[in-house]
Image: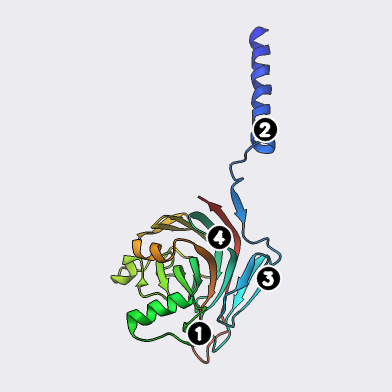
Amino acid sequence: MKNLKTGRWLFVLAVVVCTVSVGGGVRADEKWEDLFDGRTLKGWKKAEHGKAVYEVVDGAIHGVTVEGSPNTFLMSEQEYGDFELTFEVRVHDSLNSGCQIRSRGKTEADVAAEEARTGRRPQGEGGIGRFHGPQVEIEKSPGFAGYIYGEATQYGWLSAEPKSGGKPHELMKSGEWNRFRILAQGSRIQTWINDQPVGDLTHEEIYKTHPRGHIGLQVHGIAAGTGPFDVSWRKIRIRRL
């Protein structure tokens, strides 16, 4: 009888502990923030340049190309430094896209530095306001989705694999939803697609100029006479580190 009572008390204690942990205490996912509420574009705004259209369709942020438009970005209103970001994305086979991290519009200081480096001052859509920074590539398979590109920076590809002519992978499921995970800690950026590791980059130079910034959802510009093409994102969550 004593052992039976002890067993009952242990069971009750376990239930109480589980209840506090799940309902009344600190949950395992309490630090995660939803960047998209599934209904509106609250918390997001378009970067200065670009004409692509963003709207909420079937619980996802849906971006559609506009012919003649340069790259367009929908950016988070808040800025982030070190973080873990997850989302699901589905992209048209004919469209290149990407997820910007730690990015911002070019300032007068950025433009002046580029002019000093190249001898040419960027103007118009490439000048002040141009959204730039590290970008996690999104494209169909076979391709270089998940590797990191320096959007509108002097570097081009930041990841060595595409830059050195590495073999494209086939982790992206074309025409389907794909899960991305991005971990940015200091100068190191790691990426996963559908739980498979892809990029693992340490780049001190880009970290010096872009230690923090906005998250950005890209609709790439398209060639004349093509499109419209689309890309959608859903389940966008972030955890500050």
> Residue 79 at x, y = what percent?
55, 62
Q: Is residue 158 visible?
A: yes
* Residue located beneath label 3 in the image: 57
Badge 1 or badge 4: first in the primary sequence? 4
* Residue located beneath label 2 in the image: 20
- Name the amino acid type tagged 4: Phe
> Residue 159 at x, y = what percent?
35, 65
- Name the amino acid type tagged 2: Val
Disc 2, disc 1: CB below 8 Å?
no
Badge 3 or badge 2: first in the primary sequence? 2
Q: Which mark is residue 125?
A: 1
> How many badges with numbers are in the image?
4
Q: On screen, 152 above or below 192?
A: below
77 to the left or right of 129: right
Q: Which mark is residue 87?
A: 4
Instruction: Residue at the far right: name it.
Output: 39
Badge 4 or badge 3: first in the primary sequence? 3
Q: Which mark is residue 117?
A: none
Q: Nearer the viewer, mark 4 or mark 2?
A: 2
How much space separates mark 1 and mark 4, taking CA atoms? 28 Å
